[in-house]
Amino acid sequence: MATALERMMQVGAAARKVAPAPLPVPSVNPRVPDFDTLYDDYADFVWRNARRLGVVPAALDDVVQDVFLVAHRRLGELAQPGSLRAWMFSIVLRVVRDHRRLLRRKDPHQRSATPVLDPDQLPDVRANNPQTSAEHTDAVRQLHLMLSELDDVKREVFVLAELEEMTEAEISESLGENANTVHSRLRAARKDFDQAVLRYRKRDEWRLR
């Protein structure tokens, strides 16, 4: 049977789960998981957050692979399993930042022209209402557009707080920043995001005239 590391090297976007699996409930006596368990539990988490942080669709699989290669190499260094989600996001963030720097060096104006479905956008298999599924897909498309209007620093903290529902303490751990800095960035990110929402609403109102 192929290991998670081998499966990771082979699986592409077409083989993803229909919806993101819930994160595991922390155990009373947490232990550092083996890599197969880590991959199974966090593959969707890594993929959707790399997308939310602005990784272009064509590069998502490579970025996710790089994240798990780093995690595989550093798993033995993990001393506090209870902070696994924050630890995983810190790796996602580091890999995504490296990817962004490389992308900007190659082409500062490069943008994705082709939308891609991610686990957030795929319809709930329990719902058979095409209209509901279409509305959900459109809402997530708009979410990604509005996220793209935030600068990288604000985008990172907003994703953690509002989409992954992390506490400010977890965010501080993920970003390696102190609590005051996180609080200040989050307040500014929420303000900018609310302004982006208002702009999109005004555009929709104009189109309906």
Image (cartoon, rainbow, N blue to C red):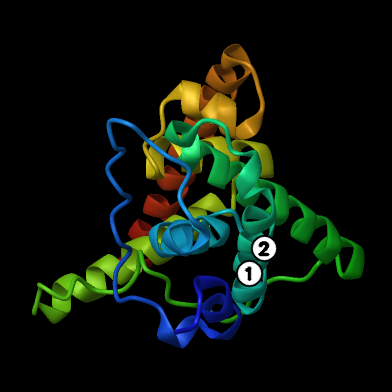
Q: Is residue 56 visible?
A: no
Q: Nearer the viewer, mark 2 or mark 1?
A: 2
Side of 61 relative to 190 (left or right): right
Q: Residue 142 location in percent, x, y?
A: 42, 61
Quadrant of res 131: bottom left
Camera-nearest residue between 178 and 78? 78
Residue at the spot 63% in from the left edge and 58% down from the top edge: 72
Tell me the SS state at disc 1: helix
Q: Amino acid at mark 2?
A: Leu
Tell me whether the residue at label 2 lies in contact with that at label 1, contact meaning CB atoms closer than 8 angstroms: yes
Q: Which residue is labeled 1 in the image?
A: 65
Residue at the spot 27% in from the left edge and 31% down from the top edge: 28
Q: Which residue is labeled 2 in the image?
A: 69
Residue at the spot 42% in from the left edge and 63% down from the top edge: 44
Q: Residue 50 location in percent, x, y?
A: 57, 59
Camera-nearest residue between 30 and 193? 30
Camera-nearest residue between 209 and 50? 50
The quarter in which the N terminus is drawn is bottom left
Residue 92, numbered circle:
none
